[in-house]
Protein backbone atom coordinates (compact mmCIF):
# COMPACT_ATOMS: atom_id res chain seq x y z
CA UNK A 1 0.00 0.00 0.00
CA UNK A 2 0.87 3.67 0.07
CA UNK A 3 3.80 4.74 2.16
CA UNK A 4 5.06 8.24 2.94
CA UNK A 5 8.53 8.76 4.35
CA UNK A 6 9.53 12.06 5.96
CA UNK A 7 12.98 13.44 6.80
CA UNK A 8 14.50 14.70 8.99
CA UNK A 9 12.77 13.72 12.22
CA UNK A 10 14.18 16.77 14.00
CA UNK A 11 15.52 20.01 12.62
CA UNK A 12 17.03 22.97 14.42
CA UNK A 13 17.65 26.27 12.65
CA UNK A 14 18.65 29.74 13.68
CA UNK A 15 15.95 32.39 13.54
CA UNK A 16 15.95 33.95 10.09
CA UNK A 17 17.41 30.90 8.36
CA UNK A 18 15.48 28.61 6.01
CA UNK A 19 14.14 25.15 6.83
CA UNK A 20 13.43 22.34 4.40
CA UNK A 21 11.50 19.16 5.16
CA UNK A 22 11.33 16.37 2.59
CA UNK A 23 8.84 13.59 1.94
CA UNK A 24 8.76 10.74 -0.52
CA UNK A 25 5.73 8.67 -1.49
CA UNK A 26 5.35 5.26 -3.04
CA UNK A 27 1.97 5.34 -4.85
CA UNK A 28 2.47 6.98 -8.23
CA UNK A 29 -1.31 7.55 -8.42
CA UNK A 30 -1.24 9.87 -5.39
CA UNK A 31 -2.42 13.29 -6.47
CA UNK A 32 -2.79 15.52 -3.43
CA UNK A 33 -0.18 16.39 -0.82
CA UNK A 34 -1.10 18.49 2.22
CA UNK A 35 1.21 19.72 4.97
CA UNK A 36 0.07 20.05 8.56
CA UNK A 37 1.57 22.01 11.44
CA UNK A 38 1.01 20.87 15.01
CA UNK A 39 2.01 23.22 17.80
CA UNK A 40 2.59 21.79 21.24
CA UNK A 41 -0.66 20.63 22.81
CA UNK A 42 -2.75 21.62 19.79
CA UNK A 43 -4.41 19.87 16.89
CA UNK A 44 -2.73 19.56 13.47
CA UNK A 45 -3.71 22.36 11.11
CA UNK A 46 -3.39 22.52 7.35
CA UNK A 47 -0.80 25.10 6.30
CA UNK A 48 -0.35 24.44 2.60
CA UNK A 49 -1.14 21.80 0.02
CA UNK A 50 -0.25 20.95 -3.56
CA UNK A 51 -1.96 19.00 -6.29
CA UNK A 52 -0.16 16.77 -8.73
CA UNK A 53 -0.75 19.07 -11.70
CA UNK A 54 1.33 21.81 -10.05
CA UNK A 55 5.07 21.83 -9.47
CA UNK A 56 5.29 24.56 -6.84
CA UNK A 57 3.01 26.58 -4.61
CA UNK A 58 3.88 29.48 -2.37
CA UNK A 59 2.11 31.25 0.47
CA UNK A 60 4.13 34.07 2.04
CA UNK A 61 7.08 32.44 3.81
CA UNK A 62 6.12 28.85 3.09
CA UNK A 63 6.32 26.98 -0.18
CA UNK A 64 5.90 23.41 -1.32
CA UNK A 65 7.54 21.79 -4.33
CA UNK A 66 6.55 18.54 -5.98
CA UNK A 67 8.63 16.28 -8.21
CA UNK A 68 6.26 13.64 -9.60
CA UNK A 69 8.98 11.79 -11.48
CA UNK A 70 11.02 11.27 -8.34
CA UNK A 71 7.89 10.98 -6.16
CA UNK A 72 8.99 13.48 -3.59
CA UNK A 73 7.73 16.79 -2.27
CA UNK A 74 9.23 19.30 0.10
CA UNK A 75 8.17 22.06 2.47
CA UNK A 76 10.29 25.20 2.49
CA UNK A 77 10.05 27.81 5.23
CA UNK A 78 12.04 30.99 4.73
CA UNK A 79 12.98 33.63 7.31
CA UNK A 80 12.05 31.29 10.13
CA UNK A 81 10.61 32.73 13.33
CA UNK A 82 10.23 31.24 16.82
CA UNK A 83 6.50 30.71 16.20
CA UNK A 84 7.40 28.33 13.37
CA UNK A 85 8.59 25.87 16.03
CA UNK A 86 6.23 22.90 15.82
CA UNK A 87 5.87 19.39 14.45
CA UNK A 88 5.20 19.29 10.72
CA UNK A 89 3.52 16.37 8.97
CA UNK A 90 3.37 15.67 5.27
CA UNK A 91 0.67 13.45 3.80
CA UNK A 92 -0.45 11.90 0.55
CA UNK A 93 -3.71 10.48 -0.57
CA UNK A 94 -4.16 6.84 -1.36
CA UNK A 95 -5.58 6.67 -4.84
CA UNK A 96 -9.30 5.97 -4.98
CA UNK A 97 -10.01 6.72 -1.33
CA UNK A 98 -10.39 9.74 0.90
CA UNK A 99 -7.82 8.74 3.48
CA UNK A 100 -4.43 10.33 3.96
CA UNK A 101 -1.20 8.52 4.69
CA UNK A 102 0.93 10.69 6.93
CA UNK A 103 4.66 10.92 7.30
CA UNK A 104 6.19 10.38 10.72
CA UNK A 105 6.62 14.10 11.40
CA UNK A 106 9.48 16.59 11.74
CA UNK A 107 10.04 18.52 14.93
CA UNK A 108 11.29 21.95 13.91
CA UNK A 109 12.99 24.13 16.48
CA UNK A 110 13.75 27.73 15.61
CA UNK A 111 16.46 29.05 17.88
CA UNK A 112 16.29 32.73 18.81
CA UNK B 1 -15.79 27.27 10.67
CA UNK B 2 -16.50 23.60 11.09
CA UNK B 3 -16.32 22.32 14.64
CA UNK B 4 -14.98 18.88 15.54
CA UNK B 5 -15.45 18.01 19.19
CA UNK B 6 -13.83 15.14 21.02
CA UNK B 7 -15.60 14.51 24.29
CA UNK B 8 -12.58 14.04 26.53
CA UNK B 9 -9.19 15.75 26.46
CA UNK B 10 -7.58 13.37 28.95
CA UNK B 11 -8.70 9.89 29.94
CA UNK B 12 -7.21 7.28 32.26
CA UNK B 13 -8.58 3.75 32.06
CA UNK B 14 -7.64 0.37 33.49
CA UNK B 15 -6.46 -2.61 31.49
CA UNK B 16 -9.41 -4.65 30.28
CA UNK B 17 -11.94 -1.83 30.45
CA UNK B 18 -14.17 -1.02 27.50
CA UNK B 19 -13.43 2.52 26.36
CA UNK B 20 -15.53 4.82 24.20
CA UNK B 21 -14.02 7.85 22.47
CA UNK B 22 -16.55 10.18 20.91
CA UNK B 23 -16.20 12.56 18.01
CA UNK B 24 -18.95 14.96 17.00
CA UNK B 25 -19.01 17.34 14.04
CA UNK B 26 -21.48 20.11 13.33
CA UNK B 27 -21.39 20.46 9.53
CA UNK B 28 -22.94 17.33 8.05
CA UNK B 29 -19.62 16.12 6.62
CA UNK B 30 -19.64 12.63 5.20
CA UNK B 31 -16.10 11.48 5.91
CA UNK B 32 -14.82 10.89 9.42
CA UNK B 33 -11.55 9.32 10.51
CA UNK B 34 -9.85 8.09 13.65
CA UNK B 35 -6.07 8.30 13.91
CA UNK B 36 -3.69 7.58 16.72
CA UNK B 37 -0.55 9.66 17.14
CA UNK B 38 2.61 8.27 18.70
CA UNK B 39 6.07 9.86 18.86
CA UNK B 40 8.20 8.79 15.92
CA UNK B 41 5.31 7.03 14.23
CA UNK B 42 3.26 9.98 13.07
CA UNK B 43 -0.47 9.64 12.57
CA UNK B 44 -1.75 6.16 11.82
CA UNK B 45 -5.26 5.48 10.55
CA UNK B 46 -7.39 3.17 12.69
CA UNK B 47 -10.84 3.31 11.06
CA UNK B 48 -12.82 5.63 8.84
CA UNK B 49 -16.38 6.08 7.68
CA UNK B 50 -17.91 7.58 4.56
CA UNK B 51 -21.50 7.56 5.77
CA UNK B 52 -23.90 6.45 8.48
CA UNK B 53 -23.53 2.77 9.43
CA UNK B 54 -20.58 2.50 7.10
CA UNK B 55 -17.02 1.78 8.27
CA UNK B 56 -13.72 0.70 6.81
CA UNK B 57 -10.55 -0.53 8.43
CA UNK B 58 -7.49 1.64 8.30
CA UNK B 59 -3.91 0.52 8.76
CA UNK B 60 -4.06 -0.49 12.44
CA UNK B 61 -7.63 -1.62 13.29
CA UNK B 62 -6.68 -4.47 15.65
CA UNK B 63 -8.14 -4.01 19.11
CA UNK B 64 -10.53 -1.30 17.98
CA UNK B 65 -14.04 -1.02 16.59
CA UNK B 66 -16.19 1.94 15.55
CA UNK B 67 -19.79 3.00 15.45
CA UNK B 68 -21.56 5.55 13.27
CA UNK B 69 -25.26 5.53 14.00
CA UNK B 70 -25.73 9.22 13.16
CA UNK B 71 -23.94 11.29 10.57
CA UNK B 72 -22.51 13.75 13.07
CA UNK B 73 -21.08 11.22 15.51
CA UNK B 74 -18.26 8.72 15.02
CA UNK B 75 -17.24 6.65 18.03
CA UNK B 76 -14.04 4.70 18.53
CA UNK B 77 -14.33 1.70 20.85
CA UNK B 78 -11.53 -0.11 22.61
CA UNK B 79 -13.17 -3.44 23.43
CA UNK B 80 -10.63 -4.39 26.11
CA UNK B 81 -8.09 -1.64 26.71
CA UNK B 82 -4.43 -2.60 26.85
CA UNK B 83 -1.36 -0.61 27.84
CA UNK B 84 -0.14 -0.52 24.23
CA UNK B 85 -3.21 1.51 23.38
CA UNK B 86 -1.94 4.39 25.48
CA UNK B 87 -1.76 7.15 22.91
CA UNK B 88 -3.15 10.42 21.56
CA UNK B 89 -6.31 9.79 19.53
CA UNK B 90 -7.33 12.29 16.89
CA UNK B 91 -10.62 12.46 15.04
CA UNK B 92 -10.72 14.16 11.64
CA UNK B 93 -13.40 15.06 9.14
CA UNK B 94 -13.36 16.03 5.50
CA UNK B 95 -15.74 17.15 2.85
CA UNK B 96 -16.45 14.78 -0.01
CA UNK B 97 -13.22 14.21 -1.91
CA UNK B 98 -9.70 13.95 -0.51
CA UNK B 99 -8.58 17.31 -1.79
CA UNK B 100 -10.66 19.32 0.61
CA UNK B 101 -8.37 18.82 3.55
CA UNK B 102 -8.93 17.44 7.00
CA UNK B 103 -10.17 19.29 10.05
CA UNK B 104 -8.97 17.66 13.26
CA UNK B 105 -10.49 17.52 16.68
CA UNK B 106 -8.40 18.60 19.66
CA UNK B 107 -7.48 15.04 20.54
CA UNK B 108 -7.94 12.66 23.46
CA UNK B 109 -4.87 11.58 25.36
CA UNK B 110 -5.68 8.11 26.65
CA UNK B 111 -3.59 6.42 29.30
CA UNK B 112 -4.24 2.76 30.04
CA UNK B 113 -2.84 1.60 33.37
Image (tube, coloured by chain):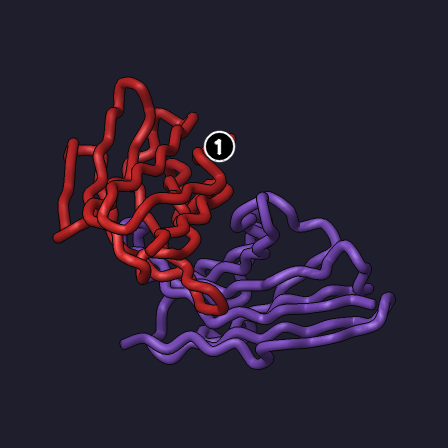
Chain colours: A red, B purple
Q: Which residue, as the protein is rendered here, is positioned at the far right? A: B16
Vertical side of A46 occupied by B52: above or below: below
Q: Which residue, as the protein is rendered here, is positioned at the far top? A: A69
Q: Residue at x 38, y 36 (%)?
A: A95
Q: How many marks?
A: 1
Vertical side of B29 occupied by B64: above or below: above
Q: Would you say A48 lies left or right of A107 here?
A: left
- The one of B73 and B113 positioned closer to us in this rendering: B113
Q: Residue at x 72, y 61 (%)?
A: B86
**Residue B28 position in % (x across, y down):** 35, 74
Q: Residue at x 42, y 65 (%)?
A: B104
In what quadrant of the picture does the C terminus of chain A appear? bottom left
> How busy is the neighbourhood of tag 1: few (under 14 within 10 Å), some, or many (20 plus)?
some
Vertical side of A21 occupied by A67: above or below: above
The answer to which image quadrant residue B29 occupies is bottom left
**Residue B16 position in % (x across, y down):** 86, 67
**Residue B17 position in % (x across, y down):** 83, 71
Q: Would you say A29 lies left or right of B17 here?
A: left
- The one of B41 and B47 positioned closer to us in this rendering: B41
- The one of A5 and A95 positioned closer to us in this rendering: A5
**Residue B90 position in % (x across, y down):** 53, 63
User: Which subunit holds the residue at mark 1?
Assistant: A
Label 1: element kind: loop
| Residue position for label 1 | A3
The answer to which image quadrant residue A96 occupies is top left
Amino acid sequence: GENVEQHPSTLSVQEGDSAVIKCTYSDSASNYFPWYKQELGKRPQLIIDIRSNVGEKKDQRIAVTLNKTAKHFSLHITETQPEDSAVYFCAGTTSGTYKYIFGTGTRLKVLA
Amino acid sequence: DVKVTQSSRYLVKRTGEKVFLECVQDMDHENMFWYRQDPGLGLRLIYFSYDVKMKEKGDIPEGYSVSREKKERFSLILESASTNQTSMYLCAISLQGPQNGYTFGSGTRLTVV
